[in-house]
Image (cartoon, rainbow, N blue to C red):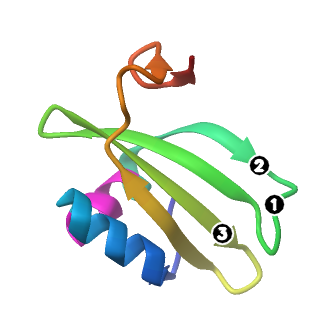
Amino acid sequence: MNCQNLVFSRHAIQQMFLRQISKQEVIRVIAYGEVIEEKPDDTPFPSYLILDFVDGQPIHVVFSYDEVNDTGYVVTAYIPNPNLWTDNFRKRK
């Protein structure tokens, strides 16, 4: 997904720090990752769960997109727990 503006929520920044996920890694996931879940009715904007593998490690990013203002919002980012995901981290158990 590409967007002109990217905003990181306070929650995202805190979780990224705790989980040792860099801003560059999150940007890469958003730019090159695979959308594995879509929630078009989320408010205030549609949201997406995006997966990419960075240096062999899976990373999920919850991303919300304001199409009118071409602004993306990083809600959170995390390394998915293999006990909770199947299909190479693409489907919830």
> Where's residue 76, x and y in %?
46, 63
Which picture quadrant has residue 41? Answer: bottom right
Figure check: 22 above or below 40: below
Residue at image position (49%, 70%) is 74
Residue bearing mark 2: 39
Residue at the far top: name it: 87
Q: CA distance from mark 2 to mark 3?
A: 11 Å
> Where's residue 39, x and y in %?
77, 49
Which picture quadrant has residue 69? Answer: bottom right
Give yes or no for contact between labels 2 and 1 (Cβ–Cβ under 8 Å): yes
- Which amino acid type is shown beneath numbered disc 1? Asp
Q: Which of the marked residues, 2 or 3, is nearer the chain's N terminus?
A: 2
Magenta residue check for 35: no
Give yes or no for contact between labels 2 and 3 (Cβ–Cβ under 8 Å): no
User: Mark 3 falls on what kind of element?
Assistant: strand
Magenta residue check for 24: yes
User: Mark 1 falls on what kind of element?
Assistant: loop
Q: Disc 1 or disc 3, which is closer to the eye?
A: 1
Q: Which residues are magenta?
A: 22-29
- Seen from the viewer's position, the closer of residues 30 and 20 is 20
Residue at the far left: name it: 55
Residue bearing mark 3: 65
Instruction: Give the number of the disc on residue 42.
Output: 1
Q: Is residue 22 left or right of residue 67?
A: left
Residue at image position (63%, 51%) is 48
Residue at image position (53%, 56%) is 62
> Where's residue 40, x and y in %?
82, 53
Figure check: 89 above or below 38: above
- Which amino acid type is shown beneath numbered disc 3? Tyr
Q: Locate the C terminus by quadrant.
A: top right
- Which amino acid type is shown beneath numbered disc 2? Lys
Q: Which of the marked residues, 1 or 3, is nearer the chain's N terminus?
A: 1
